[in-house]
Image: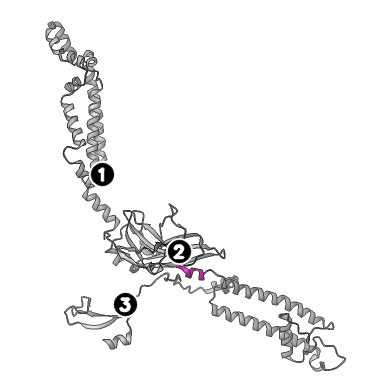
Amino acid sequence: MSALRRKFGDDYQVVTTSSSGSGLQPQGSGQSPQQQLVPKRKRQRFVDKNGRCNVQHGNLGSETSRYLSDLFTTLVDLKWRWNLFIFILTYTVAWLFMASMWWVIAYTRGDLNKAHVGNYTPCVANVYNFPSAFLFFIETEATIGYGYRYITDKCPEGIILFLFQSILGSIVDAFLIGCMFIKMSQPKKRAETLMFSEHAVISMRDGKLTLMFRVGNLRNSHMVSAQIRCKLLKSRQTPEGEFLPLDQLELDVGFSTGADQLFLVSPLTICHVIDAKSPFYDLSQRSMQSEQFEIVVILEGIVETTGMTCQARTSYTEDEVLWGHRFFPVISLEEGFFKVDYSQFHTTFEVPTPPYSVKEQEEMLLMSSPLIAPAITNSKERHNSVECLDGLDDFSTKIPSKLQKMTGREDFPRKLLRMSSTTSEKAYSLGDLPMKLQRISSVPGNSEEKLVSKTTKMLSDPMSQSVADLPPKLQKMAGGGARMERNLPAKLRKMNSDRFT
């Protein structure tokens, strides 16, 4: 086995196949399987950890001509080795072409043969062959001007070629030097000093399940107007049967609250709260092992020193998301300043985290709560209470006005019914409370139970309760009402009885 590992490397792990063909079994399972080397499956990323996108454009056909329409951007986007090759090749071809033009003028005028004649005036003095014509062009183009080779006034074609050489040289210099300058000043290297944590974590924060990762800035110069965005790349199939490869979904990292606008002076932890609107609403620790997704993080900002926009990217696959972990603190207070320890930037530690998804937690919370009365039942009870109130109003009109004035509680039945209905609503509202509060409210002797017993007692004996609430003088009058009625004549007693009926 050691020889095989030396041959294939550590990227291969030893697995075993059972004799029944049921699948792959780990080594050392007690069986006698055949050992074989199977390569680890490498997760194909859409965006690498360094921010490079793994996308290649093919079969463009005639669309390749669009690159030439924006030649400057095409040259800037090329790699450095191609830029240097084009830079050297362009200058070399331009110099050889212009030197050839000066040599052709000297050849057609016969300056090469008559250069040593004393009274002959050539087009360009001291140009005898192609090397001397090339040196004249270089001296003219670089504005060196040694003074040995120069144009005379007897050569109008040489003057025209000199003007063309100056214009062409300025265009080539502006194009190539500008291209090299833009490529050197690109803020891509500034993104190298923006750090992202190697892993993302999922744990509880402020009582909510939260996806978190960390960003940091290694330079003292700030990123002006820094903003962060997150995209979830996941293939899915629509209800109509359409397959969407690498469908992009937005992950809210504080867009509504402004938390996506970063003051990136020290490392920050970016949070995405997993709720009903999150794509991870039904993601649990178990389901994450079978899921395939990629979280692309995009950090944008303006470089303070150059004023150019910089963008840094990274991504996290499902294997790089740690469930039940939290980042280690990196900021400490020293004497007069805050110190950032970047050695702990990627460090995480385990914390207690429920392995269930937010959807499963909500369902378990609903199942553990008492049965809540439907809204229809509540509406029916309210309708019945209104009918009872109307019936009590009719009954109160049948009570003699003398007794109503004596009690002074004409709206007493309506108030009692309201109290009883409020008590029933409070009893139904107990199901909305947490279990701990429900246990507290269900303990005997609490104020709510006393209120129910008091209301029941008042309903059972309203007249006695109303008389007890009267002043002492009126209580005597109300108590003596029965004796006064017995002393009345039979005709008056009959009239009172008819009024009650």
Q: In the rendered structure, which disc, 1 or 2, sits on the residue that comes first in sequence? A: 2
Neighbours of disc 3 within 10 Å: few (<14), some (14-19), many (20+)? few
Q: Residue at x 66, y 76 (%)?
A: 173
Q: In the rendered structure, which disc, 3 or 1, sits on the residue that comes first in sequence? A: 3
Residues at marks 1 and 2 touching, judged by CB atoms closer than 8 Å:
no
Residue at the spot of label 3? 40
Query: Against 122, is 313 above or below?
Result: above
Segment colored magenta: 189-194
Percent across and percent down for residue 249 are: 40, 60
Residues at marks 3 and 1 touching, judged by CB atoms closer than 8 Å:
no
Query: Against 7, is 449 above or below?
Result: above
Neighbours of disc 2 within 10 Å: few (<14), some (14-19), many (20+)? some
Residue 65 visible to an observer of this rendering: no
Residues at marks 3 and 2, CA–CA distance in whole angstroms: 29 Å
Q: Residue at x 85, y 94 (%)?
A: 117
Neighbours of disc 1 within 10 Å: few (<14), some (14-19), many (20+)? some
Q: Quadrant of residue 210?
A: bottom left
Query: Against 61, is 7 above or below?
Result: below
* Mark number displayed over residue 298: 2
| In the foreground, 47 or 485 | 485
| In the foreground, 279 or 484 | 484
